[in-house]
Image (spheres, rainbow, N blue to C red):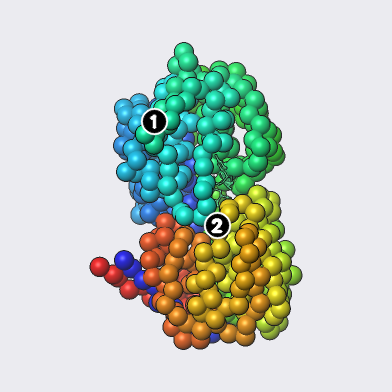
Amino acid sequence: MDSIIVRGNGALNGQIPIAGAKNACLTLMPATLLSEEPLTLTNAPRLSDIRTMTQLLRSLGAEVAAMQDGKVLAMTSHNISNHRADYDIVRKMRASILVLGPMLARDGHAIVSLPGGCAIGARPVDLHLQALEAMGAELELKEGYVHARAPGGRLRGGTIAFPFVSVGATENALMAATLAKGTTLIKNAAREPEIVDLTRCLRKMGAQISGEGTDTLTIEGVDRLNGATHPVVTDRIELGTYMLAPAICGGTVECLGGTIELVGAFCEKLDAAGVSVEETDLGLKVSRKNGRVRAVDVATEPFPGFPTDLQAQMMALLCTAEGTSVLEEKIFENRFMHAPELMRMGAKIEVHGGTARVTGVERLKGAPVMATDLRASVSLILAGLAAEGETIVNRVYHLDRGYERVEEKLGNVGAHIERVSGQ
Ligand code: UD1
């Protein structure tokens, strides 16, 4: 397994291009199953999760061609030749459950394995299933698989009222509703930019959707969808991650393609911590206002709140801030696995349930650490850049699921970072 070696750094300066959003691409790709015409995505990120989704779609009979070094994905699903998403692929990535809604909506039946994914809590899929049931689906759970059927071969419009906000369940419901007979109302829908992006793409394909970016989506089902070409929205999590690099190390980094709109709540916290963010023609320019950053309290929330996917990276920053910060994780119950690793580097952190108290130290110390999930891995790299000496981040396969060419992007702005290939 590969490792990443990071050496404590001075200031970082330069530009970092931000890729298309992994989480948007992972929901846009299954949308190909809704139409027999081609769906082409541009600005796709080059990541192992995208390759896993490619493999899954191909196993269902879709043609997927990765062009321009993977930045363009040309997909066609003339027909779905296999309606069973197998455990062997699905277990690698939780977003695989997103093929369920489209397959069921197009052909009236689907069998999908229950997913695995990052170990950040129980993460059930009950809301996905309840949403499909509200559209008339009959579901059965057998031997780890969801067997789904639409009576008469077609879902029907219904009212879905989510008890709490779920990104994935909103995406599955939205895609399924585009081909259902009649009107579907999704209440308490997620408002993440990735959902707005999906809505825009589905609309290009001929779907009738209103309410994008609000908590109520109304979908008038249509009989068929056509093809489309769509650029994947900028990855706000990759953006936020690289914005933290100059905040941690000093210097000025311009993140190309970033906008404040994508990371508003995060920018407010950076501002309070003493980090300046300036919108330029090309993206967002970030630097420390003066000296050491200050402690801030952070609570994760659904969009437009502070994203759970930036909590670990923010913690890395706050490990060297002046004062004590309180971080509250309100989306996932087990998402502080990076804390013990950061403590191995000299961070002062106390975790009690969903709350972590971080008291800043002057400087972290390099250490061998273990990446436990995707966002945790990159938080350890950021912490390593702020540490004295060498940090070895082991088990970086998680990192490759969500960050393309991290060594190159950070290396280009002056970071001392290299990848060491394992067996
Ligand atoms: C998506 C993102 C993930 C991000 C998360 C929150 C993708 C591929 N993944 O994940 O990176 O961290 O949003 O912004 O886009 N829940 C249930 N039942 C369900 C579904 C969810 O109880 O059926 C719970 C989850 O356990 C969690 C909360 O709802 O506590 C929110 O999860 P959700 O928004 O669904 O996250 P994902 O779509 O899995």
Residue at the image point whose x is 45% and y is 39% from the top: 97
Image position of 368 (left or right of 244): left
Label at residue 334? 2
**Of the numbered discs in the image, which one, if any, rests on residue 142?**
1
Q: Quadrant of residue 75?
A: top left
Q: Position of residue 116 (x, y in %)?
A: 42, 47
**In the rendered view, would you say 194 is above or below 201?**
below
Look at the image and tell me in which quarter the N terminus lies. Answer: bottom left
User: Percent from the top left, x then y, of residue 225?
Assistant: 49, 26
Residue at far right of view: 272
Whether residue 289 can be seen here: no
Residue 347 position (above or below residue 310): below
Q: Residue furthest front?
A: 352
Judge by depth and name the residue closer to the eye, 285 or 2. Answer: 2
The type of residue carrying mark 1 is Lys
Asked if residue 263 is positioned above or below residue 252 in the image, the reply reads above
Label 1 to label 2: alpha-carbon separation: 27 Å
Q: Looking at the image, which residue sits at the far top?
A: 152
* Badge count: 2
| Residue 187 image offset from top left, x and y in percent | 68, 33
Q: Is residue 359 left or right of residue 72?
A: right
Q: Position of residue 309 (x, y in %)?
A: 57, 57
Q: Mark 1 Cα within 10 Å, few/some/many (few <14, many 20+)?
A: few
Return the disc, 1 or 2, that comes first in the chain's sequence.
Answer: 1
Q: In the rendered image of this protein, does residue 203 appear above or below residue 318?
A: above
Report the residue at 44% width, 22% height from top: 149
Q: Residues within 10 Å of mark 2 (few under 14, many from 20)?
A: some
Q: Secondary structure at mark 1?
A: strand
Identified at 53% across, 74% down, the residue is: 342
